[in-house]
Image (spheres, helix red, strand yellow):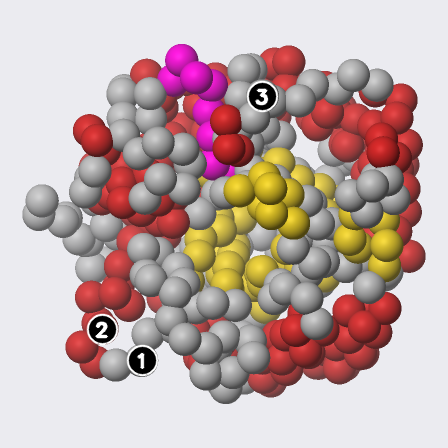
Amino acid sequence: MQKQWDPTPHPIRMTAHAPMLASFWIAGFDGTDHVPGGLAAKGLHDIDAYRRRVEADYDGVRDAGVECVRESVGWRSGASDFQSAIVRAQCARRAGLQVVWTLCHAGWPADVDVASPAFVERFRDFAGAAARALAPYAGGCAPVFTPVNEISFLSWALAETSLFGVQRSDLRHRGYEIKQQLVRAALAGCDAILEVHPGARFLHRDATMIVGAPADDHRRDAQFESWDMLVGRLEPQLGGHARYIDAIDVHCHHTGAGRGASPAPSSSSAGLPAGSLPRLLEDVHARYGCPVVVSETNRTGSGRAAWLREFGEEIGEALARGVPLIGASLCRVVERAAWEDPRCWRGRRLWDVLLDGGDDLPRVANSAYEHALRDVKARVAPLLAHSHRR
């Protein structure tokens, strides 16, 4: 398929009236909204117990000096899913936390076909309904949304893998078409949200990989495709425009795997060659001219504290280079069963959940990770102050 490319640069919409994020550090509670491993989706059987758990988690976030959380609404069956999101919105407002909402993480209702034209309209309706449901809890601040999470990764996973269940044969090798479809949906979702919140802001997140060899130029360019479509540079007939992106979220996986790339051997404990992440963040900012957020997925076990320290060093270098880095997301802060295999639990978060804790699921802090987070925050804080003065 011939790609349509508009070489004209599009300045990204900038808003100076208020910071986009309440704090530089973001606690990622966001979860996938597909049904993992064939398990039945769990409803809220005890809303009061759920509220107590959320309040405890958010209090822990505040105690860690973080004022922003990332959450997923969950697009599974429609308005019934808003119950848990509303509880979290209420708890966040009580705790004084900002929520960055992801509307479609990796799933949709069973009667929605991602490849059908109806997908876009169904998502637009869902996005508008979600925005209206959450509107009373915005607290007068401009809400921040990620309409569709990691479009490039999701399109690759659907077309080339069985990560989200049995692979559909009719989607095989159609990743670029699916990517365009997800971009259409994201843009329609943005429009629906703007009808509710004209001042809403959009943070579009995608996975990235470090590509160094000249022979990999195609892979390097491919990782920008979804963002290029969203701003209208690539496939302008989709309707992309600069107004749909306020900031770009670069999701850095420790394996170096990204948009359809096979996991590569790590050249450092963080999975990234030294200095490569700051260069990538520079490239993203130069390409789109907008603020940047960086997200990390923790290493497992004892390596997670070392990985966080390396991540912090890379953040510091990016800030020193003048990259307008406005946020860093820790994904996730609470452990859960792996979405690709619910039998698998990994120890890699700020808090681990005890498997034998019954309904209360008590959190156990990882002191090494907490100490690393405290050290990294202290390392980054003066650089942030200097960046803001500039």
Q: Give the alpha-carbon distance from disc 1 to disc 3, as whole Å.
A: 43 Å
Q: How many neighbours does mark 2 have within 10 angstroms: few (below 14), some (14-19), or many (20 or more)?
A: few
Q: How many neighbours does mark 3 have within 10 angstroms: few (below 14), some (14-19), or many (20 or more)?
A: few
User: For residue 216, which numbered disc appears in the image?
Assistant: 2
- Residue 345 placed where, x, y %? 65, 49
Relative to 278, 119 lies left or right: left
* Amino acid at dot 1: Gly
- Residue 283 placed where, x, y %? 39, 73
Residue sitting nearer the eye, 80 or 337: 337
User: For residue 212, which numbered disc appears in the image?
Assistant: 1
Of tags 3 and 2, the one toward the viewer is 3
Residue 50 in sight here: yes
What residue would you read off at disc 3? 40
Going 71% across and 42% down the picture, which residue do you hit? 99
Task: Determine if the magenta segment contains residue 12.
Answer: no
Going 47% across and 71% down the picture, which residue do you hit? 281
User: In the image, which residues are magenta?
Assistant: 104-112
Residues tagged 2 and 1 counted as in contact (Cβ below 8 A): yes
Which numbered disc, 3 or 2, marks the residue that appears first in the sequence?
3
* Amino acid at dot 2: Asp
Q: Give the alpha-carbon distance from disc 2 to disc 1, as whole Å.
A: 7 Å
Relative to 367, 161 lies left or right: left
Residue sitting nearer the eye, 178 or 386: 178
Image quadrant containing the C terminus: bottom right
Q: Give the alpha-carbon distance from disc 3 to disc 2, as whole Å.
A: 41 Å
| Quadrant in the rendering for residue 207 | bottom left
Which numbered disc, 1 or 3, marks the residue that appears first in the sequence?
3
Residue sitting nearer the eye, 3 or 214: 214
Going 50% across and 43% down the picture, which residue do you hit? 340
* Amino acid at dot 3: Ala
